[in-house]
């Protein structure tokens, strides 16, 4: 079923490489991508959050994967109100008088530089779109981006600026789904044909509740962040610590059923695993493919996947990766 796409939110994560999932002869990002693409038909690119790659990189990604393989691009962090190091900016666009150790937000950059950054970023993304290799363009906003008119207006501008790319919006504060805000937010997404990015994550005071509304005609996105609540609630927890969680099959099964139902309506359903600690994400993504019974021409499908990764209910347990 082409409408069902399963993958992970990185193929270059250091802990995944250290886990031994890649063969010994996969020593660079391109050879690892080729190996990854023999199992999955889509991937999320997180490196674009930290810096804007050269145009040739996007062509290289496409060249090393099958024609139907889709890349989902994470928007450059300044466009989602994150703080980034000034070194994330292309050298020729770096504002004068700023030290290399500085960290910036988008409004601290001159307007002409913002425009140039956006034009550079979106032109690279549309390289993939022009080859029918772009799944979605993800704008992942941090927890401090709460419901407000200012932020609603920015979402609307994003839809216009990013056209014709398919845009997915991920919010990380529950104020967006509170009474009085929810329908305004979801109506805007529907009006702009942007996907609400559903998430599975720990249930904390500030996190987003487990809802999965469909707001875009082109499809929907579900991202699995894991359920490591103690790490999410811990001040200054490292990224790897927060995503150290391995789902069990009973936790994944309800999502496979919903995904099947959504896919019947004709849009694409992206099930993306962001529990990127060691091989947790690839293991769970393979298990989800087995639950769905989908195969994109890769080497393994169905029960073979479960046997390979020993992900039966009596096998690996949720809550963390196994020791190597």
Image (cartoon, rainbow, N blue to C red):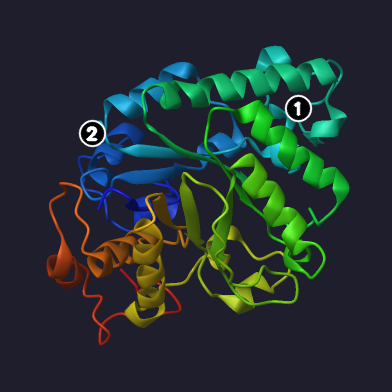
Residue drawn at x 70%, y 52% as measured from the top left:
187
In the picture, residue 95 is in which quadrant? top right
Residue 297, position in %: x, y?
Answer: 15, 46
User: Eyeballing the image, is 75 above or below 141?
Assistant: above
Residue 52, position in %: x, y?
Answer: 57, 27
Relative placement, left or right, of 38 versus 127 is left
In the picture, residue 304 is in which quadrant? bottom left
Residue 48, position in %: x, y?
Answer: 55, 35
Relative placement, left or right, of 61 versus 91 is left
Give the structural element (helix, strand or loop) at label 2: loop
User: Eyeballing the image, is 99 above or below 23?
Assistant: above
- The span from disc 2 to disc 1 (Cα, nearest Å) is 40 Å
Task: Please report whichever mark, 2 or 1, sits nearer to the chain's N-terminal start.
Answer: 2
Q: For this rendering, which residue is in front, 200 or 193?
A: 193
Relative placement, left or right, of 145 versus 245 is right
The disc placed on residue 35 is: none
Q: Is there any visible trace of residue 223 in the rendered image?
A: yes
Residue drawn at x 64%, y 70% as measured from the top left:
232
Task: Name the residue tied to disc 2.
Answer: 66
Residue 163, position in %: x, y?
Answer: 59, 28
Give the structural element (helix, strand or loop) at label 1: loop
Assign the C terminus to one quadrant of the image. bottom left
Task: Name the residue tied to disc 1.
Answer: 100
User: Eyeballing the image, is 123 above or below 136?
Assistant: above
Residue drawn at x 59%, y 38% as measured from the top left:
49
Q: For this rendering, which residue is in front, 198 or 205?
A: 198
Residue drawn at x 35%, y 50% as measured from the top left:
17
């Amino acid at each position: 079923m082409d409408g069902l796409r399963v993958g992970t939110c990185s193929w270059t994560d250091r802990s995944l490489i250290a886990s031994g999932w890649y063969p010994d002869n996969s020593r660079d990002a391109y050879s690892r991508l080729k190996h990854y693409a023999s199992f999955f038909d889509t991937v999320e690119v997180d490196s674009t959050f930290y810096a804007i790659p050269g145009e040739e990189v996007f062509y290289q990604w496409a060249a090393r994967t099958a024609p139907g393989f889709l890349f989902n691009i994470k928007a450059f962090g300044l466009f989602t109100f994150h703080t980034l190091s000034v070194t994330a900016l292309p050298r020729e666009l770096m504002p004068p008088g700023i030290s290399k150790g500085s960290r910036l937000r988008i409004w601290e950059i001159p307007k002409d530089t913002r425009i140039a950054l956006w034009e550079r970023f979106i032109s690279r993304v549309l390289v993939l779109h022009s080859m029918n290799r772009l799944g979605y363009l993800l704008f992942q906003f941090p927890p401090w981006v709460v419901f407000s008119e200012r932020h609603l207006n920015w979402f609307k501008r994003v839809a216009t600026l990013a056209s014709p790319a398919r845009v997915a919006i991920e919010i990380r504060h529950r104020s967006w789904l509170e009474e009085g805000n929810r329908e305004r937010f979801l109506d805007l997404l529907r009006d702009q044909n942007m996907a609400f990015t559903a998430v599975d994550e720990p249930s904390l005071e500030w996190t987003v509740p487990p809802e999965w509304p469909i707001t875009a005609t082109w499809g929907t996105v579900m991202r699995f962040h894991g359920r490591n609540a103690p790490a999410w609630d811990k001040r200054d927890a490292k990224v790897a610590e927060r995503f150290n969680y391995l789902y069990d099959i009973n936790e994944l099964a309800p999502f496979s059923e919903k995904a099947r139902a959504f896919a019947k309506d004709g849009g694409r359903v992206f099930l993306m695993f962001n529990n990127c600690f060691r091989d947790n994400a690839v293991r769970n993504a393979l298990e989800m493919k087995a639950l769905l019974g989908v195969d994109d021409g890769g080497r393994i499908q169905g029960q073979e996947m479960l046997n390979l990764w020993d992900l039966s209910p009596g096998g690996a347990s949720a809550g963390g990766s196994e020791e190597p």
